[in-house]
Image: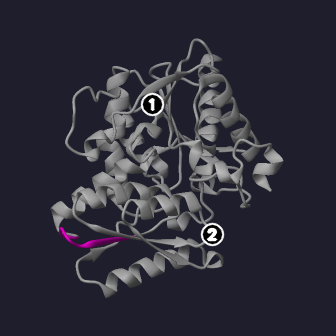
Amino acid sequence: MTTHEEPVDSVLETIGRTPLVRLHDGPETVPIYAKLETFNPGASIKDRIGQYMLEAMLERGDVSEGGTIIEPTAGNTGIGLAISAEQLGLDAVFVVPERFSVEKQQLMAALGAEVINTPTEDGMDRAIDRAHELAAELDNAAVPQQFSNPLNTEAHYETTAPEIFGALDGRVGAVVAGCGTAGTLMGLARYALEQDPDTHIVAVEPEGSVYGELLGDDRAEAEYKTEGIGTHDTATNQLFEPELVDAVDAISDRDAHDELKRLAREEGHLVASSAGAASVAAKRVARQIADGDLEVPHETVVTIFPDSSERYLSKGIYRSFEEWTS
């Protein structure tokens, strides 16, 4: 829970310890709690990995103070890394496909980072290649690479998960979270399964994503509007560990959109589409538990709301579904 009751010396000390808040649209007998990561200084869960990864990379000598970190990113990870880079004495360069979120690119630049654009049609693959090319051209430079760096998972094992279990006195029966890089869910899953191996672990993806194939599910790859989670190529998601996951729940864009609007209107949560999808999936799990169709060690479900809807207002996130997806 947020415990910043005394002055602190750095914005880095405000990362984490975010609120865990009960949701009120699920079964009364199976409470659902959401970790509100918008309370981080950069308004997303990626602040956690920004701090954790850079501090670890400095400690083990991957880069030294005065050096440069270069990351291919389209969004919140760049903001999280930029916040920590400046405070830790590092320069930050982000390689972003040119038509990705203008708001996020502006925030990265405001935080002191250099933003380099690559052609949109070349996708993230070209951004990744360009980041490594730049790192090779510079002395004292490194690419954190959130999609493959185990520090991503470790950050949530060491910070997010203990906060959740501490707030609930260890009474967590199911963990339901979106998978983009998969770092968040894998960190939570490892910690949860150490506490009780019967904890139910659910990955959340949009319909059109193919994470489910890693658990043997049939998936039809297609475009989707829900941002921040899902994958079109599981080969790029090196952190996902299928053996830690019981199910992958695919949520339609329409259901995610309906839920994010409901969360704002009824419960006061200004969250984005990935949170909408996570909430839908968490309620499905809670209903399974309440109906006696799923046995868990504790009748409690936990999920993650990764970021704020304010980053997506220009994309019409609160307009009609047709306007949002057009």
To which residue does mark 1 refer? 199
**Magenta-drawn stretch contains 64:** yes
**Residue 90: image location, x then y, percent:** 25, 66
Magenta span: chief secondary structure: loop
Disc 2 marks which amino acid? Arg
**Residue 188: image location, x then y, percent:** 40, 40
Disc 1 marks which amino acid? Thr
Query: Dot 2: few (<14), some (14–19), or many (≥20) neighbours within 10 Å?
Result: few
What residue is at 29 percent from the left and 27 percent from the top? 3
Indicate the secondary structure of the residue bearing disc 1: loop
What residue is at 66 percent from the left and 56 percent from the top? 209
**Residue 324: image location, x then y, percent:** 76, 50
In the image, which residues are magenta? 63-70
To which residue does mark 2 refer? 99
**Residue 121: image location, x then y, percent:** 66, 77
Q: Is residue 80 visible?
A: yes
Tell me if residue 75 comes above or below residue 274 in the rendering.
Answer: below
